[in-house]
Amino acid sequence: EVIDSQCVVGPKHVLIYDTTLRDGTQGESVSASCDDKLKITKKLHGFNVDYIEAGWPGSNPKDAEFFERAKTELSLEIRNKLVAFGSTRRKGIRVMEEDAQIAALLESQAPTVCIVAKAHVWQVTDILRTTPEENLEMIRDSVAYLTSHGRRVFVDLEHFYDGYKYNEGYALQCCEAAADAGAKCLVLCDTNGGNMPWQVESTTRKVVQYFNHLVTVGVHTHNDAGMAVANSLSACKAGAGLVQGTINGIGERTGNADLCSIIPTLALHMESHVHCRNELSNISSLSRFVDEILNRTPNHAAPYVGTSAFAHKGGLHVAAMERSPMSYQHIDPAQVGNEKRVLISELSGRQNIMGKLKDAGVVDQEDASARATAILNRVKRLESKGYTFEGAEASVHLMILHATTGYCPPFRVLDYSAQVYDANIDSASRVMEMERRNKERASAANQLLGKGTSRATVKVRTLNLDEEAFLNEEEPLMYKDRLEVSDGSGPVDALAKALKRALTPSHPYLNNVKLVDYKVRILDPESATGAATRVMIEFRDEESDENWTTVSVDRNIISASVNALVDGFEYALVEHASSCVLCDDAFPDPYDEQD
């Protein structure tokens, strides 16, 4: 509505136009179902972006389905933000009703449509293979027809910045054709992503001045030269009042301009008025949500929203930040829903450990300084053996707790064992041949054995919650040994299931904990089968959606895996569950009982 009544001029005012669901899905390995697109649309609306380009209804059935379902499944408030994408009419068509994709734009009932038009004369003559005059008529006819049907029309001027350098006059003629026909926004596109920020700023300023605030100028950039964000911000600085981009910068080739970088920079560094300013603290959550829905691995180093965006490793940096958090941060991470992290590694200083002690609530102990030095030395020794604690903060937290007087773990693993079994140990070729000849017999054998190929036994000592134990007149045992067995698809899977089965009767919170990643790295391959192995396991609390990671190193991959599993479950109970813990007297050495 703002763009209908006035020309929006940046950088003071900038409208946010999200094209994640259209241009973003053109990225390699990026795909979204119709249900996914509806979920992301609702999330984008909640973040209060101005426009949501949801798809091209004239190009594929999925996008047509989205706009059809949107009519009944999305609120009117959300539907008012939807944009349907399309192109100008086809060359040679004189009756607009005969163009099926133009008709699909109207049928979508989106209040705003964005059509792409060629703005580079060489692209018109050699790629589109029509005359420059016909291209101008295609722009005028399409905009006028859609406007006459009550649609707000934006025009993406494809290859504009390159076209302006090639033939300035014709590029401006394309803009004039759109504006004269009633377009509300002229979106200047760096389609090939090869322009530099100073070129974009200069050209955008000339276009803004040329139209003298009669129409809003927008910008759409690609990241082929790594300049998409910089080019978008440069255009806004030159007067562009609308910026197109995608969440996390997904898109074709190397991606589009990343709104997760553009929006905070506009709001916090350029002091632009953006309507989503009040939702800025949710942008990290939005970034993770879109990655989760699209099944993408988040970029930990992403500006503002990545888990490493405010991570500090060097001891001098951490020491300075203890005096002033802004000594090595450009903003308060809470402004974008992120948080400061202090990394622990062989490069850390004592101040890094002191920060972790403070987080653990034990910094006031008299020996905190000496203990920080001892823990730091231990970290350095362990990292020399192959440990890495930068991505395993849960293990660091537990290391600190175990070095704290009075800490009592919630359980202890007394012993464990794992067995691996199989009905066939032949080479791969013989297995394939046997499967071909004896499919029925193999099927029967699999049914007999079950789905698992491993079996694990775990014995733990944990809280005794049996009611009968507390009904006796004698003093009840506060702890209980529990032995559990479980099958799994491999020894680590079987051990994880057995450990969880043994712990959940006393700690039901663990039912919420899921293992989401398991990584193994061989540290010294020259040692062959005797090589040291580093295991990192990532866990997630399904209720709070919080993740944590633990690490362990051993020449026995099973031992390394068990240690990381135990740390992960212990951290879950200590940090996330309201569970009692056992004191040291509940953990006599089990071998002492045999003496």
Image (tube, rainbow, N blue to C red):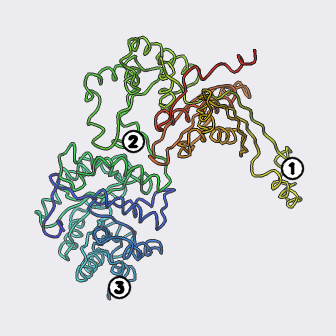
The quadrant in which the N terminus is found is bottom left
Q: Which residue is mark 1?
A: 430
Q: Are marks 2 and 3 in contact (CB under 8 Å)?
A: no
Q: Reading the chain from its start, which is encountered first: label 2 or label 3?
A: 3
Q: Reading the chain from its start, which is encountered first: label 1 or label 2?
A: 2
Q: Nearer the viewer, residue 473 or 453?
A: 473
Question: Going 36% across and 70% down the picture, which residue do you hit?
Answer: 74
Q: Which mark is residue 588?
A: none
Q: Is residue 286 above or below residue 319?
A: below
User: Relative to 6, is 51 on the left or the right?
Assistant: right
Judge the density around disc 2: few (<14), some (14-19), many (≥20) Cα neighbours within 10 Å.
many
Q: Which residue is mark 2?
A: 306
Place of residue 314 in the rendered image (x, y in percent of width and height, measured from the top left): 38, 23
Place of residue 270 in the rendered image (x, y in percent of width and height, measured from the top left): 19, 45
Amino acid carrying mark 2 in the image: Gly
Place of residue 485 in the rendered image (x, y in percent of width and height, measured from the top left): 73, 40
User: Relative to 337, is 515 on the left or the right?
Assistant: right
User: Relative to 32, is 53 on the left or the right?
Assistant: left
Question: Going 51% across and 35% down the picture, which residue do you hit?
Answer: 573
Question: Going 36% across and 37% down the picture, which residue do you hit?
Answer: 309
Place of residue 233 in the rendered image (x, y in percent of width and height, measured from the top left): 25, 49
The quadrant in which the C terminus is found is top right
Q: Reading the chain from its start, which is encountered first: label 1 or label 3?
A: 3
Q: Which mark is residue 93?
A: 3
Q: Are marks 1 and 2 in contact (CB under 8 Å)?
A: no
